[in-house]
Image (cartoon, grey):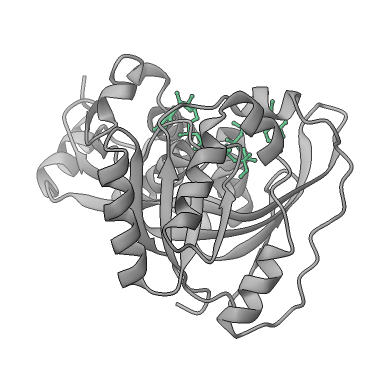
């Protein structure tokens, strides 16, 4: 039953709050070791796309969760295990009685289990949105701990701006010099299991990521990114051979640089302009209408 406090929240404000859950892109991902608990130590250069899922939050007499969007159906069957609801429940426990019932709607535009952190971005957007809706404040460390419990990528998705992430993703350093990139995200719509890719990794102690601290020019950044790696790409390519094909398609359509993001299978191509990226995405869509191609501009570090 709803308490009188909850009822007053519901009647006082039926306006909704929206949050963007931007796709996360690992421009580089170096696996540098493994912790005793099995988690891998990573060095990552990460940025975020101006494209992603969209969440809406509003007070409600009872908790509710609904889904829509191109990939909403993929998650509909197991909404009980959705990271959005895990984030809501963990935050509610941390906040206490202020956390009245909510209706949450998730427009799922990002492919699931695709290396661009859709679930992590949704969880982070839920933390941001519900903090606003509930008018709650939590010490920064407490919020960071809630985020990390939800997944290694959730702390960086809370930030959603260019950064270097180390450890398993809990050590974050902003990169304000990173420029925006015109990009195409490409995915053959075969989900990849992150633990399975890590299990197949042949070498766990690889050289760390080395980037000079300040490179304001896009061409310099492209050269630095090209010199880095995604160590998860070879094992992911074994699991999903289409990754090799999709990277070649991006290149054939004018990408200056292509790489896989996260544990795959999404690959990104960086283009000279948004017009070039949009033209490439349209041509790729015509070639494979059953795959996912999305032109997007990434956020700049200075934004
Ligand atoms: C690989 C990355 C790179 O950004 O991205 P995605 O491919 O998921 O997008 C992430 O580190 C993924 O983070 P996230 O998706 O939150 O992973 P979690 O749910 O915490 O972990 C899922 C499983 O992956 C493995 N895992 C994950 C992270 C890590 N540093 N080492 C690991 O070995 C573990 O087996 C873990 O049980
Ligand atoms: N809101 C959500 N969006 C996507 N996946 C989710 C969500 N909630 C739970 N999951 C589960 O989390 C796993 C990882 O999903 P996702 O974050 O999309 O992967 P990745 O980080 O590789 O892009 C999937 O197996 C999926 O079933």
In this orientation, does residue 127 appear? no
Q: Is residue 13 left or right of residue 85?
A: left
In the image, is residue 124 above or below residue 216? above
Give me the residue at 14% from left, 49% from top.
13
Quadrant hosting residue 62:
top left
In the image, is residue 2 above or below residue 294? above
Q: Could you tell me which quadrant the N terminus lies in?
A: top left
Q: Could you tell me which quadrant the C terminus lies in?
A: bottom left
Q: Nearer the viewer, residue 29 or 100?
A: 29
Give me the residue at 88% from left, 29% from top.
36
Give me the residue at 38% from left, 36% from top.
111
Residue at the outermost bottom position: 216
Q: Nearer the viewer, residue 55 or 181?
A: 181
Give me the residue at 34% from left, 51% from top.
294
Q: Position of residue 42 (x, y in %)?
A: 75, 47
Q: Position of residue 23 (x, y in %)?
A: 43, 50
């Amino acid at each position: 039953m709803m308490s009188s406090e909850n009822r007053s929240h519901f009647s006082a404000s039926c306006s909704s709050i929206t949050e963007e859950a931007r796709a996360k892109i690992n421009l580089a991902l170096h696996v540098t070791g493994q912790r005793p608990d099995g988690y891998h130590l990573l060095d990552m250069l990460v940025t975020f796309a101006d494209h992603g899922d969209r969440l809406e939050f509003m007070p409600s007499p009872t908790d509710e969760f609904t889904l829509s969007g191109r990939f909403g159906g993929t998650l509909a069957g197991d909404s009980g295990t959705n990271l959005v609801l895990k984030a809501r429940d963990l935050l509610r426990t941390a906040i206490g009685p202020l956390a009245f019932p909510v209706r949450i709607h998730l427009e799922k535009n990002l492919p699931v289990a695709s290396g661009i952190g859709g679930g992590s971005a949704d969880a982070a957007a839920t933390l941001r949105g519900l903090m606003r809706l509930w008018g709650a404040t939590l010490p920064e460390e407490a919020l960071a701990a809630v985020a990390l419990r939800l997944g290694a990528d959730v702390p960086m998705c809370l930030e959603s701006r260019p950064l270097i992430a180390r450890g398993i993703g809990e050590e974050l350093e902003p990169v304000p010099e990173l420029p925006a990139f015109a990009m195409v995200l490409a995915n053959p719509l075969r989900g990849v299991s992150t633990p399975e890719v890590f299990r197949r990794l042949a070498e766990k102690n690889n050289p760390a990521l080395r980037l000079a601290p300040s490179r304001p020019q896009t061409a310099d950044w492209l050269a630095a990114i090209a010199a880095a790696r995604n160590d998860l790409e070879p094992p992911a390519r074994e699991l999903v051979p289409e990754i090799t094909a999709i990277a070649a398609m991006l290149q054939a359509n004018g990408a200056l640089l292509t790489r896989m993001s996260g544990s795959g299978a999404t690959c990104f191509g960086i283009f000279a302009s948004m017009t070039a990226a949009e033209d490439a995405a349209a041509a790729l869509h015509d070639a494979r209408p059953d795959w996912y191609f999305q032109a997007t501009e990434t956020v700049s570090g200075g934004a």
